[in-house]
Image: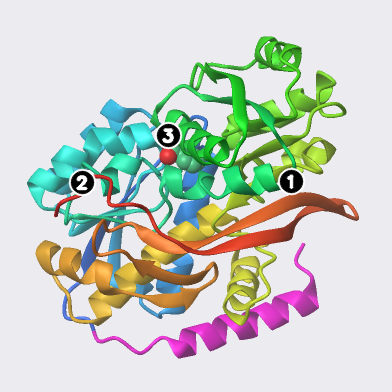
Amino acid sequence: MKHPVRAALAACAVTALMAAGAPFDAQAQTKVGLLLPKSSVYASLGNEIDDGFMIALEEAGMAGDFTIVREDTEVKPQVGVAKARKLVLQDEVDVIVGIVSSGVLAAVRDFVDGAGVPLVVANAGNNNATGKDCSKYIVRVSFSNGQINRPMGPWMAEQGIKKVYTMAPDYAAGRQMIEAFTETFTAAGGEVIGGDFTPFRKTKDFGPYLTKAKATNPDAIYVFYAGGEAISFVKQYDSFGIKSEIPLFASGFLTSPLYVNAEGPAAVGVKTGLHYIPTLDTPENKAFVEAFQARFDRVPSEFAVQGYDAGRVLVEAVKSGASGRDAIAAALPKVEYVGPRGPLTIDPATNNVVQNIYIYETVAEGETLTQKLLGSVANVQDPVNGCAM
Ligand code: BEZ
């Protein structure tokens, strides 16, 4: 049940946000293919991105200017390609928005580039998509896997942590996130003394891996897990008795506000890095949190903001007069603004977002869990990584 005062305040915030969007007299509808997981381990992420995307269109007063066709990737690369082909060849969309898994992004990259269809990446962090496999048709408003994890290496070394054991799912995102952390942590004097890549979408029991990690006697464990796997991992890290002995650090998806309350007290004290937390004390974020809560009756997560920013860059591109695939692809990277996560720009050398990274701790506040800001690194930008557009 919505709190009446909060709902009234939030309704005002929505009205104010909508008033801020310039009225737009569209000649033609823009057709969007929303390509997200609606099933499997990342289904909740896909739904949250969808909700954030819709908030951006509504805030601009432009929901009626877009036709949306939704397809489920099932977090499977070949399904993602088949659905991308369907959206482009059968539905004739002007732009695709979405993709959560780095594996799916790698699989659809050649198709969207060859077809000349703009793709606004609203999650998948695969470094190569804005590195050696970049394309003028691919613009990423979410993050790259390297960008999220690099700041954690020096920060953990500064906390006096010397020996770390790592764990992540065995696919592109898991490998790239751990690689980025390892690179900066070792450069700062730390040592990665062991690690495991667990079978992706198949691991239900993390016990054997946690037992192995504990036997190496590390100062800390560093992981990347998201969605359903994150919930299982955090709960088992506590139930196997490791939490009381070895501190847990991670990329911030581990304790996302989207599912941290499902993890419960096991998540308290976990320290992570991420590009957005809902507790950021800025006017832009407060307005967004209010609008999102008014519409969906829950706190927005990083996935909601990624969906919102994907919608907002698209709205801005269309408002600037872009119509049709090539014009939209050219306009998207030029959009910049200060949004819920802080300043957002797109690096013209890679088409990857440039943004702040926040280090936060999950803390208990009464019955709920929330995010306490510990530090931040401003305007984190990826190296060009072989991108030539
Ligand atoms: C990825 O596959 O790139 C990814 C999935 C979930 C959260 C973060 C990254």
What residue did someone put label 2 on?
A: 87
**101 or 381, which is in the foreground?**
381
Pick the quarter of the image with the C terminus: bottom left
Q: Secondary structure at mark 2?
A: helix
What residue did someone put label 1 on?
A: 159
Which SS type dominates the magenta stretch? helix
Residue neighbourhood size for the residue with mark 3, other residues' Cα within 10 Å, grouped as few (<14), some (14–19), many (≥20):
many
**Marks 3 and 1, the one that precedes in the sequence:** 1
Residue neighbourhood size for the residue with mark 2, other residues' Cα within 10 Å, grouped as few (<14), some (14–19), many (≥20):
many
Foreground mark, 1 or 2, reads 1
Whether residue 201 appears in magenta in the rendering, the answer is: no
Q: Which residues are magenta?
A: 1-25
Q: Quick check: 361 left or right of 143?
A: right
What residue is rendered at 16% in x and 56% in y? 136
Percent x, y for residue 192?
A: 59, 26
Q: Amino acid at mark 2?
A: Leu
- Is 319 located above or below residue 294 in the figure? below
**Marks 1 and 2, the one that precedes in the sequence:** 2
**Marks 2 and 3, the one that precedes in the sequence:** 2
